[in-house]
Amino acid sequence: MRENLRNARKDASMTQQQVADKIGISLRYYQNIEQGSRTGDFEIWDNLEDLFNIHQRKLREISNNRLDREDNP
């Protein structure tokens, strides 16, 4: 899961559909990017960076929360 991307979207008070519409992709494609199962191309990440005003390197980070919890019971 890309928690930073999800949090940026929520901080902007936007739905996944609104973000997808704003950057010109399908809802399903955006959901897959946010979930971490699709990477997305450079243009998408440039648009997300501009939309949320957060560097795309930060938005692209994938959280391993489940793994972190297993390592630190």
Image (cartoon, helix red, strand yellow):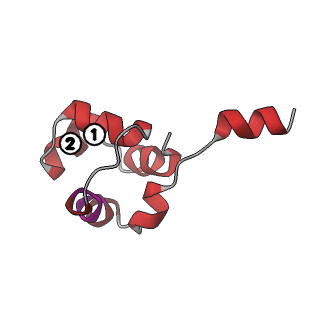
Most frequent secondary structure within the magenta stretch: helix
Q: Is residue 3 left or right of residue 19?
A: right
Q: Give residue 45's position: percent from left, percent from top.
A: 29, 60
- Occupied quadrant, residue 57: bottom left
Q: Which structural element holds mark 1?
A: helix
- Occupied quadrant, residue 46: bottom left
Q: Is residue 54 among the parts visible in the rendering?
A: no
Which residue carries the number 1 mark? 30
51 or 25: which is nearer to us?
25
Say which amino acid is labelled 1.
Tyr
Quadrant that contains the C terminus: top right
User: Does the magenta run of residues contain 3?
Assistant: no
Q: Around disc 1, counting alpha carbons within 10 Å, would you say few (fewer than 14), some (14 to 19), or many (20 or more)?
A: many
Q: Around disc 2, counting alpha carbons within 10 Å, would you say few (fewer than 14), some (14 to 19), or many (20 or more)?
A: some
Q: Residue at x 52, y 45 (%)?
A: 3
- Occupied quadrant, residue 72: top right
Say which amino acid is labelled 2.
Ala
Q: CA distance from mark 1 to mark 2?
A: 6 Å
Q: Residue at x 50, y 51 (%)?
A: 4
Which residue carries the number 2 mark? 20
Q: Give residue 41's position: percent from left, percent from top.
A: 25, 56
Image disc number at residue 52? none
Identify the magenta region.
44-48
Please report whichever mark, 1 or 2, sits nearer to the chain's N-terminal start.
2
Q: Is residue 41 among the parts visible in the rendering?
A: yes
User: Does the magenta run of residues contain 47?
Assistant: yes
Give the answer, above or below, for where 32 lies relative to 44: above
Q: Give residue 28's position: percent from left, percent from top.
A: 24, 30
Give the answer, above or below, for where 16 lies relative to 53: above
Q: Is residue 70 left or right of residue 26?
A: right
Is label 1 in contact with label 2 (beta carbons under 8 Å)? yes
